[in-house]
Image (cartoon, rainbow, N blue to C red):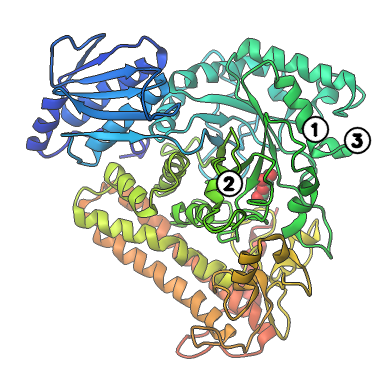
Amino acid sequence: DDGSRLWLKYDLLKDAQQRDKYAALTKFIAANHNSPIVASAVSELQMGFQGLLGKKVSASASAGSRTGGVILQVNANAQNLLEDGFAINSQKGNIVISAKTPSGVLYGAFELLRNIQTGKSLSNLAIVSNPKVKIRMLNHWDNANGTVERGYAGSSMWKWTELPFRIDPRYIQYARANASIGINAASINNVNASSRFLTAEYLEKIKAVADVLRPYGIRVFISVNFRSPRTLGGLKTSDPLDPEVKQWWNDKTKEIHQYIPDFGGFLVKANSEGEPGPQDYGRTHADGANMLAEAMRPYGGIVIWRAFVYKADPNGDRFKEAYDQFKPLDGTFDPKVIVQVKNGPIDFMPREPFHPMFGAFPNTTLGMEFQITQEYLGQSTHLTYLAPMFKECLDSDTYAKGKGSTVAKVIDGSLESHQNSLMAGVANTGSDVNWTAHPFNQANWYAFGRLAWDYDLTSEHIASEWIAMTLAKSKAGQETIKRMMMQSLPIYISYTYPLGTAHMMGEGHHYGPEPWLEKSGRPDWTSIYYHRADSVGLGFDRTGKVSNALSLYSAEVQKQWGDPERCSLDYLLWFHHIPWTKKLSTGRTLWNELCFRYYDGVEQVRKLQTDWESLKPELDKETFENVKGRLRIQEKEALWWRDACVLYFITYTKMPIPAPLVPPTRSLNEVKKLVEIYHLR
Ligand code: BDP
């Protein structure tokens, strides 16, 4: 198994009795609606039944008096359903999938298949499922030249040189995979955007992609470069208040719609990390976003404006930057604008407190940006299941309107009654045959989609679904893999960023540890800016003395994190500078606890290896060997993180590594040399 089929394998079910049971309920397909999306649903069901049950199932427009089949119904008046939602009911001897829209029917078809794939009963079905978030989106950081920013699974899956004339069959597989988990939007290019994507030449290519994705209910977005009126249009400025600039965007937006009538909209990274933006002309983020919203006015699409901004200030705190820049603009954004905020205030660290903007912007529609690609989470060599991280953020309570004001409720629009809602994930897909390099990274794509649909699903539940469809067949095997997945994020954090440390990775490529990094292009790209180690202790005091970032949160959250005695150890060093000798709630001193965690992380990776080995008899050989090899790299790299961090921090603590832990056999200089390799030209 090369992994290319993802979780949509549709291999013949081994149990013949079970196959017969399903077969008796799936004798025919009847679809009352003639649309490309419903046609996708029908063909998916046919493909699924053929594979899983080993039988050809015919499709027609009506069931007539037949029973034992699957009926697909689009019914604009369907009760209890939102747009995209679906119901699946056992009715008069048939299984009826009904929805308000063709997309809903498609999602229902995938749900039915998932029930079969995971061995559920199809009798007495009474399922109602509505998406919690309206725009469930992948952000591709793919470049026109075929590279992928922070991509670890080969090159871009979009073959720009081949488009529009050759359509890679993988586009259809991609669309199916996304539709199967409810993803309905994709921005196809890097947020560090090239204007090239707005040329007629490229719009024709993007149109070809949009045409493939449309029958699966997926709308295409384009990341735009704010300077395009100058670079492409030949104008003297890109000032958003300049009439010619406005006209240029109006015309461009109109032109895009000639190619893609259901264009999703623009995604914009502006005045961030050197990208152009409205501040170049003394204007605000709202000026820029609203100008684009105006261009979008005649159409259904929207503008997604990213809040990932921070200026290089050695005495500031990057934690507060986005909040400070956007807070005065709350209430000034056009209703067509969604401000897309990363889950945490810094940058996709393995564990961050939720972004303080959530709950503090009642008059702005805020969307969530998660990173599925594992830039800081082991890239393609560490097994790290991210659902628990996504959920930790979504379940966090902002207390904005009292207890229960979770980040999830900000994002789905319910807390502040916003019409629109967005959850975006930076994609981890690439040209690798199995899409994501590490077979387990597929689970993160899967989990993102499932949580965007329903953030109340548990991480365990999502893992179980994915495992049953993708890997082991035995119950015991599935349980072992689930345990491995559920432990994987805590293990990763243990040997990289224990106790609320952050941002100590290799410079630029972000691979491996470099906690000693003191100089970089900007002060806030170093490691020492974040960990603040000194002879006294470790951690960034954000409670007032160094930075008052904690004050951006509600009083309840301040209480939860503000007192070092009560603050969860998971977040401790995010908010406090703690003496090395301070005794923590575990009974160990900070220094001893740190050492213990780094060492334990490595031990746990070894346990993951043993667990994986025990599954050998029942796993596909290719997948088994693939993961086995990656776990060996993970062990080596966990040791690298451990040794780098303890040897470096020891230069401050001057304390021994506590027994019974055995000090590293290599020196700090030797570990530093390892990192240098990655900077060699
Ligand atoms: C950082 C990445 C950088 C992205 C940036 C962003 O290192 O490549 O361009 O995020 O989100 O984490 O814009």
Against 404, is 218 above or below? above
Comes first in the chain, label 2 or label 3: 3
Mark number for residue 618?
Answer: none
Comes first in the chain, label 1 or label 3: 3
Name the kind of residue labelled 3 in the image: Tyr
Is residue 234 in sight in this rendering?
no
Left or right placement of residue 442 versus residue 318 in this view? left
Name the kind of residue labelled 1 in the image: Gly
Nearest the camera: 286 or 446? 286
Q: Quadrant of residue 251?
A: top right
Left or right placement of residue 675 versus residue 485 in this view? right
Name the kind of residue labelled 2 in the image: Val
The residue at which mark 3 appears reads as 281
Instruction: Give the residue displayed 61% in from the left and 32% down from the top.
Output: 146
Q: CA distance from mark 1 to mark 3?
A: 10 Å
Q: Position of residue 11 (x, y in %)?
A: 23, 34
